[in-house]
Amino acid sequence: MEISIAVEGQTDDAVLRRVAAHVGVVVGRAYPARGREKLLAKLRAYAEAARHSPWLVVWDLDQSAECAPSFLRSLSETPTASFRLRIAVRSVESWLLADHVAFGAFFGVSAPRIPVQPESLARPKETLLNLCRESTHRHIREGVPPPAGSAVAVGPGYVSTLLEFVGTAWVPDRAALRSPSLAGTIRAMASLRAPR
């Protein structure tokens, strides 16, 4: 089964492709919106496109609402036989932190330092960056977090390092044990695989 996906950015795209491969779904087209507001503005168009082929749309909850269900209820689009909306609580970085085994080994971080409930973090991306500052690997310490005193949000190696992690080490099922929103996204992706 081939589906289309819409996400906020490049890291989200890689994560969904990894989930798709995990559940036996092929991603045909991907639409990284380059930002949450642009993605939400196109929801109706994606829902309409799902009349012809399956679609999965995922974005970060960030600070939009206290919980994902209340935010989903505030949207006009609802899931149908071939259209799914999912939210990463609070961001896709929490899904990456949730695979504590792979994260610790890949990023050179002590396992006890990795949060047990990454979805409870107010800013998972900030936590990820702070953990990378403690890494035993120099290229992680110097490439993933922004340089001290810099105005940029992330280091020059942030995206490429996360893409490598997702592609080579991250295990969706293991991460789903600590991330209910990822577990729900895996189920939603798998449900699009079934014949309609």
Image (tube, rainbow, N blue to C red):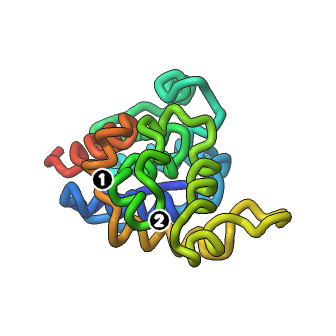
- Residue at (65% x, 74% y) in the render: 142
In the rendered view, does 196 fall on the left or right side of 72? Answer: left
Tell me the CA gap for discs 1 and 2: 17 Å
**In the displayed structure image, the side of residue 11 where residue 183 appears, left or right:** left
User: Residue at horizontal 59%, vertical 60%?
Assistant: 134
Which residue, given by chain and number where applicable, does mark 1 sit on?
172
Front in this rendered view, residue 152 or 61: 152
Q: Secondary structure at mark 2?
A: helix
Q: Residue at x 44, y 35 (%)?
A: 117
Label 1 or label 2, whichever lies nearer to me, is 2
Residue occupied by mark 2: 107
The N terminus lies in quadrant: bottom left
Q: Residue 175: x and y, percent?
A: 33, 48
Relative vertical location of residue 32 with respect to residue 61 in this rendering, above or below: below
Q: Quadrant of the C terminus?
A: top left
Whether label 1 touches label 2, CB < 8 Å: no
Q: Is residue 17 above or below residue 63?
A: below
- Give percent across and percent down for residue 69: 47, 24
Res 15 seen here: yes
Identity, as a three-letter code, of the amino acid under mark 2: Phe
Judge the density around disc 2: few (<14), some (14-19), many (≥20) Cα neighbours within 10 Å. many
Assess disc 1: are there few (<14), some (14-19) or many (≥20) residues with their C-alpha within 10 Å of its C-alpha. Answer: many
Measuring from the top left, give residue 124's x and y in whole percent: 57, 45
Q: Is residue 48 visible?
A: no
